[in-house]
Amino acid sequence: MINYIRIRGAKENNLKNVSLDIPRDKLIVFTGVSGSGKSTLAFDTIFAEGQRKYMESLSSYARMFLGQMEKPDVESIEGLSPAISIDQKTTSNNPRSTVGTVTEIYDYLRLLYARIGIPHCPKCGREIEKITVDQIAEKVLELPDGSKILVNAPVVRGRKGEYKKELDGFAKSGYARVEIDGSVYDLSEDIKLDKNIKHNISVVVDRLVVKDGIRKRLTDSLETALKLAEGLVVISRDGENTLYSTNYSCPDCGISIEEIEPRLFSFNNPFGACPECNGLGFTTRIDEKLVIGDPNKSISEGAMRVTGWNLDSGAMADMHMRALSRHYGFSLDTPVKDLPRSVLDVILYGTNGEKINMTYSTRTFNGSYYARYEGIIPNLERRYKETTSDYTKSEIEKYMVNSDCRSCKGKRLKKEALAVTVGGYNISDLCDLSVVKMRGFIEELTLSETERIISKAILKEIKARLKFLEDVGLGYLTLSRSAGTLSGGEAQRIRLATQIGSGLTGVLYILDEPSIGLHQRDNEKLIKTLLKLRDLGNTLIVVEHDEDTMRAADYIVDIGPKAGVHGGEIIAAGSVEDVCNEKRSITGDYLAGRRKIEIPAKRNVPNGKWIEVFGAKQNNLKNIDV
């Protein structure tokens, strides 16, 4: 077995024909002054060659889709393992990515809530139980006499596939019609579905008119539909669908909750996402403060920042504003800040369907007509939705802000998902707890014997992954935190914690300064995590300047002596003592105490000029003035 990674003749970037033997299954630190070639050796040479060799091991068919990777400028590297790079550019800017989804803890939470969650009515908050067939029949018979209804069995809900075999089976069972994605088909037709699109398929079990004497037939049809759709039935009336579930329904409000399964708790799935914000937790809207440029000015003086909505913008704006002024009795010369709120609402949001008299005058013709006034903000919103021009979109976005969704209050999920609790918390509120507090909650969770048996394996995974996050000094994060708001160091340590959870062995991990952004008190936790990953049977190469990490390393490679063209050489390689004894090593000088950075005896005096910040609330900032 090869116990070393042997590098011969590395000349990438500023490396000067570097040859080096690095021990495997150890914690190795690459250090040296900034720009000396540490990252070039670690990422552009070792990792790049590891990736290239992995690509070459794939079939020629797979390589067609992945493309060719250039060989780094190195004569040879032997003893390489499959390599994983954990650098500081791994933060996802996808607004759907959170700490919970990136670490996969949220996937286990969804499973936990689907298996032992207690459902409540989204309207009244009452704990709800399964509804019976007779109770569904009672609800249907409360409809007005003469109502025409369809009893449908929703056999497929939001799933991809052609379903050819299933449709043939329904036809052979004697059913005549199915409703697919809102359209009704005869089962005698040749129905072809796109297998790459999610479909909703309901079997039409019966068509009924509500009247006396249909209870027996209705009950039989409901039982048939429930059996077909595994506890679900849809009653369609005049194009409106009402879902009933023998699983859970509130007897007071008549609200049924669909089958409780993991996808109900996913904000990246239409079945769980809030319908208003589509699972983003925020909506983008026009902000009236951005529309009104200067409230001290009047409309005639150009108060509106939006192009085309001041009197000098053209005939249409002039006609609309003068018509509003006449109809609602206000002056276009009054500063916007002094206008009544009711008048400002009309200018910004329209006449709410009321038609007003518009008069116009051209060189050849004068006239008038009655029309509704749309309003500046509805006009911008409509144009933003309808336009295909990127330029128009970017112009309108100047007046837009992100704000918490009014429906879900930023929780991303639909109300049915938020009505399911474990230990008194719904899944969103639980994810709003810090990692430390959530771990305490999970540890103290009181469960029945049955719930304990069901959730044992799930809770074990959740606890372990939360512990890994604590171990890398991220116990203060919440799982609901957007991945795009994480610092480079935080994102890197999250990936590190995820890799420990994966339990891989025989892997070469290459990390880029994982201590960045980490409080000194948590340095020890990070080092323990690195050593744990090493002890699993992995090789770790860490590009780092941190003294504690160097002293904990099994092997140090000091690259220098200076930056750029004056670097690219191996100054020292070996233990901490070996580096300290190397006279050319600047790192060795500092480790040995021959050099040190003195604390200034006198601090600089402020010049009396200040940057003032008021009401900062970004991410976790609590309305800070500084």
Image (tube, rainbow, N blue to C red):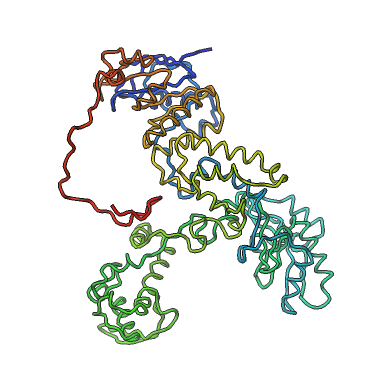
Residue 23 falls in which quadrant of the image? top left
Where residue 426 sits in the image (x, y, percent)?
Answer: 58, 54
Q: Nearer the viewer, residue 388 or 400?
A: 400
Left or right of 530, for residue 154: right
Left or right of 304, for residue 193: right
Residue at horizontal 17%, vertical 45%? 606
Residue at horizontal 57%, vertical 59%? 414
Left or right of 176, for residue 269: left
Where residue 574 sits in the image (x, y, percent)?
Answer: 38, 14
Q: Nearer the viewer, residue 402 or 324?
A: 402
Left or right of 375, for residue 234: right
Residue at horizontal 36%, vertical 16%? 576
Residue at horizontal 40%, vertical 50%? 620
Compared to 475, does 162 lie above or below? below
Q: Nearer the viewer, residue 519 or 601?
A: 601
Compared to 158, does 37 lie above or below? above
Compared to 114, does 394 lie above or below? below
Residue 567 falls in which quadrant of the image? top left
Where residue 401 sits in the image (x, y, percent)?
Answer: 38, 60
Q: Nearer the viewer, residue 381 or 335?
A: 335
Q: Quadrant of the N terminus?
A: top right
Where residue 523 sits in the image (x, y, percent)?
Answer: 41, 31
Total number of numbered discs in the rendering: 0
